[in-house]
Image (spheres, helix red, strand yellow):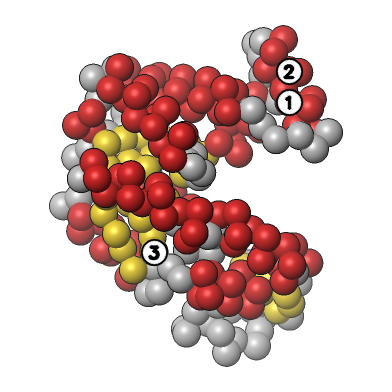
Amino acid sequence: MKKILIFIGPPGSGKGTQAKLLAQKYGFKHISTGDLLRALSVDAKASAEQKTALEEMKAGKLVPDWLIYELAFEAVKENLASGKGVVLDGAIRNVEQAQKYQDFFEQNGWNDEVAVIEVALSDEEAFNRLTKRRICKNCGEIIPYLSATKDLVDCPKCGGKLIYRQDDKKEIIEARIREQGNEALKPIVDFYEKLGILKVLDGNQTIEKVNAEIFALFE
Ligand SMILES: [Zn+2]
């Protein structure tokens, strides 16, 4: 079993859910850059530079790459040093970042520990899933747009009313897909393919089916 698993895929592909399930099953640490930034913002030991970057981020600036590297690399080191594997989710947005991570792994002698899992989904299907998913007005359960759930009228958990989410507005989702969809992913996918460490799964299937295929990869 490899110790460093990297998930990539377009928004709506379910890669975050799969990353968490895999981490749970193997007792790996699930590392999401969003979580790392949230943790840093309440960390008393944050450096002055880190605090400045967080302030600027709150004011709408992009998170600087060095901060992401600093946090993610530290988290990877800490876990691998104690013998624990890691699952990286949403960490890599372009080839430059992919290369940086790869350099870091090589410097630490972890070249053979890396596997990349792409949860593949067309932009069209990603758009459908994100604009057509619903949330329960009562309990907050998210109902994905899948063949098994698309015709539901009431919440399967509490019977509450299902509504569309404000965040899921068309224009916002179109912008997200432009930035993080298949066109942006293509160079990253090519990068990992050349390294021979990429596994591709069909994200059009149900969460359970994709999950079973991921587990089968490592059995
Ligand atoms: Zn509900």
Exactly how many numbered labels are in the figure? Answer: 3
**In front of the other: 61 or 131:** 61
Whether residue 25 can be seen here? no
Q: Would you identify the image quadrant in which residue 164 lies?
A: bottom right
Q: Amino acid at mark 3?
A: Ala
Sequence-wise, the earlier of marks 3 and 1 is 1
Q: Which residue is mark 2?
A: 51
x then y, percent, for residue 162:
70, 79
Q: Which residue is mark 3?
A: 120
Q: Is residue 131 above or below residue 7?
A: below
Q: Amino acid at mark 1?
A: Leu
- Residues at circles 2 and 1 in contact by the CB criterion of under 8 Å: yes
| Residue at image point 19% right, 40% down | 1
In whole angstroms, how far apart are the C-alphas of marks 2 and 3? 36 Å
Q: Is residue 125 above or below residue 153?
A: above
**In front of the other: 142 or 124:** 124
Q: Which residue is mark 1?
A: 54
